[in-house]
Amino acid sequence: MADRLTVHDGETPVYDIVFRRDFGGFGEELEKLGVGRKKICIVSDSTVASYYMELLQAAIGSPSVTSFVFPAGEENKNLDVVRRLYEHLILQQFDRNDLLIALGGGVVGDLTGFAAATYLRGIDFIQVPTTLLSQVDSSIGGKTGVDFDSYKNMVGAFYMPRLVYINLATLHTLTERQYLEGMGEIIKHGLIKDRRYLYWLKDHMEQIRRRDTDICERMVQRSCEIKKDVVERDPKEQGERGLLNYGHTLGHAVEKETGFSLLHGECVALGCVASAYISLRRGDISRDTFLEIEELIRSAGLPVRISGPDKAQVLAATKHDKKMEAGVIKFILLKQAGEAYIDRTVTMDEMGEALDYICAGDLQTL
Ligand code: GLY
């Protein structure tokens, strides 16, 4: 596969997703974009900055680069931090021709993208995603935003980056748990769009688990390709893009009701199992297919069972789902492994049964 993909808006190329194994090519990419004399602010969190800030600054090689670093953690994905970033940009006299670079995972990418979308009504930004989850999901497609109180991504904008630069070497500094949460979104890509990719993931799980670079590269490229194709066809989520929310309605609700003690990708994995359970109960997928899906998720080191959340509260939380339309939940179900559809008829009872399953499910009773 080539070292880049281009995301289009209709026929017009909008930005490239570049796959590299270091930051060595970053300066050249900036030149191609004609960044020239722009002021640049690299936005990062405290953890990622300690690994990669100097390396990225060196790769840019310009003295007019500033940085804005905020404490790591989802709890900082809020308007307060955005306000502090605006303040920094105003003090450094950033104008509409200048550039932000988001160096980090989903929190950094979403927050920086939102600041870029709104500062002076929009300045350019580049995504440099450093987690598996952000490389395959949140850095692509222009969803930006922050949380508001306990409501995730409640405030935001669709705003496209000028470039997504993926340095696959950054996967090696992730903790096991941070790395594996990305597999929740990756398995989701296979479930909604590509059955053969699911088999490939199954066959290469051992290399994936030990972060074999060649295999990770192929996996990240394939997932980015799936996501790119979807967001090109439906950039503003008026239809098909909704499929990317597979596993997210119940996943987000579990994430909220467990006080964000589980990572997003872990909750997506649980949501994928619960959603597949509904498809099983509806007779859309077979017991064998369901068990294969569950086993794939388990083999990726992700949770398929959870103890603790109050079922009524989780169900209540699904009502705040952003995918609601006129009070109806747009739930994503499987026609088969590798093909998904949007369904507006999933009932609270069905979701309740699926939750019972992931809380205490016994394979024998299936
Ligand atoms: N993460 C889902 C989307 O970008 O639409």
Image (spheres, rainbow, N blue to C red):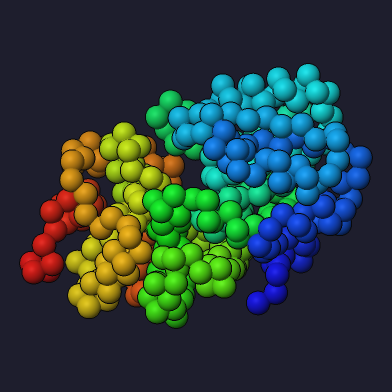
- Left or right side of 300 for 222: right
Specify whether 296 is left or right of 12. left
Q: Quadrant of residue 229?
A: bottom right
Between 206 and 89, the one nearer to me in the picture: 206
Is residue 117 among what the camera can see?
no
Q: In this view, does 8 lie above or below 120?
A: below
Q: Is residue 83 left or right of residue 278?
A: right
Q: Where is residue 47 in the image (x, y as percent from the top left)?
A: 54, 37
Q: Nearer the viewer, residue 69 or 224?
A: 69
The quarter in which the N terminus is drawn is: bottom right
Q: Residue furthest left?
A: 365
Q: Is residue 273 above or below residue 144?
A: below
What percent of the width, then of the height, locates residue 315?
A: 24, 42
Task: Give the quadrant of residue 286.
Answer: bottom left
Q: Foreground: 110 or 44?
A: 44
Identified at 73% across, 60% down, the residue is: 16
Report the quarter where the C terminus lies.
Answer: bottom left
In the picture, measured across the screen, residue 116 lies left or right of residue 138, that is right
Please tell me which residue is depicted at 38% across the width and 45% down the height of the picture.
263
Identity of the residue drawn at 47% across and 34% down: 73
